[in-house]
Image: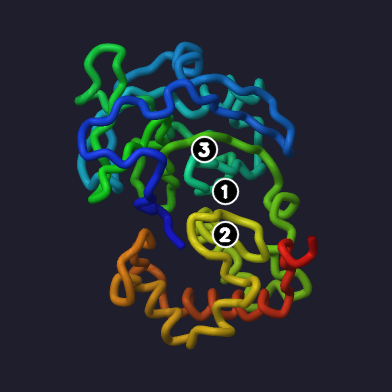
Amino acid sequence: MDRHPLRLGLSTLGLLAPLAVHAADVRFVRDGTLVKAVDVAALRAACTPTTVTVDDPNYRARKRYLACPLADILHFGFGTPADALGSADVFIRAWDGYDKPTDAAQLAEPGAYLAFGDADVSPGADLRWAPLGPRGIDPGPLYLVWTKPARTRPWPWQIAEFEVVDFRKKYPHVVPTGIARSAPAWQGFELFRGECIACHAINGEGGDVGPDLNVPRSIVEYRPVAQIKAYIRNPTTFRYGKMPAHPDLSDADLDALIAYFRAMSRAKHDPRRSR
């Protein structure tokens, strides 16, 4: 349940890391159909990389990256201007299972860049990255960065795929259908969608970095509510792991998440048991 997770990816290196999956294809998918697959070198050649300076919340430092405007990348990948995607959802999928849904309109904004390497540690065409976090993660081959303030904006790394698809079509069993729209469960759903689903699933739908929170048993069926809230606020008081703290969530936000979990515990869909 995180906005900027320090995830353990494909390459965990203590030294400056060359592009770990340089030859890997980056996929552009619409409604489950592959539109284009292109390797990182070809993608970089299709745009005009420039050096951008950002305040990076993951490195907690001011960084310079060789990057292209994300709007140009999406236009190249999908064959249509990014702002023409309108209110669609774009799922940004990483190599480690992180799967972040984001409004297409936000990704089309000026200030969003797809980075190919760290300008300060990349000699010539040999693109490299400074190790990220205590595990020395390599954020390549692609890292979404912003020249705008970081709050509420996604910063996923190790990007493997962009998919344009309606959220409810992709994850129909995550939505609390049958619940009044004025109910707190819907506020909790929006929080889960924005903060949690990139790493956690409900009913087998969502990211797989963390555990499914609804099947086979809902988290509210085996953890006390007070413990769940405390864990979301500061997980390191329970155990050391990949999930960061969420001090910005209010008491009302946590109550809404619990209401959502309770609603979904009565609407289970377990794909493993339905096989």
- Quarter where residue 9 is shown: top left
Q: Is residue 124 left or right of residue 97?
A: left
Residue 188 in sight here: yes
- Which quadrant of the view contains residue 34? top right
Please say if 29 is above or below 103: above
Separation of marks 3 and 2 at Cα, in angstroms = 17 Å
Nearer mark to the viewer, of 3 and 2: 2
Q: How is the image coloured?
A: rainbow
Given contact means CB atoms under 8 Å apart, are the residues at marks 1 and 2 in contact? Answer: yes
Q: Amino acid at mark 1?
A: Pro
The local crowd at label 1, few if under 14, some if 14 to 19, many if 20 or more residues have their Cα within 10 Å, is many
Q: Which residue is mark 2?
A: 193
Q: Residue at x 59, y 29 (%)?
A: 27
**Mark 3 secondary-structure assignment:** helix
Q: Amino acid at mark 3?
A: Leu
23 to the left or right of 62: right
Q: Nearer the viewer, residue 171 or 9?
A: 9
Q: Residue at x 38, y 25 (%)?
A: 116
> Which residue occupies 70% across, 70% down?
176
> Which amino acid does the dot numbered 2 rest on?
Arg
| Residue matched to label 1 | 101
Q: In the rendered view, would you say 189 is above or below 25?
A: below
> Closer to the camera: disc 1 or disc 3?
1
Give the numbered dot on residue 107.
3
Residue 104 position within the rendered picture, expressed as x and y whole percent measured from the top left? 59, 40
Q: Do the CB atoms of the residues marked 3 and 2 lie less than 8 Å apart?
A: no
The residue drawn where x is 61% and y is 23% is: 37
Q: Would you call the spot at circle 3 few (<14 residues within 10 Å), some (14-19), or many (20 or more)?
A: many
**Element type at mark 2:** helix
Q: Quadrant of residue 86?
A: top right
Q: Label 1, label 2: how many angstroms apart (C-alpha)?
A: 8 Å
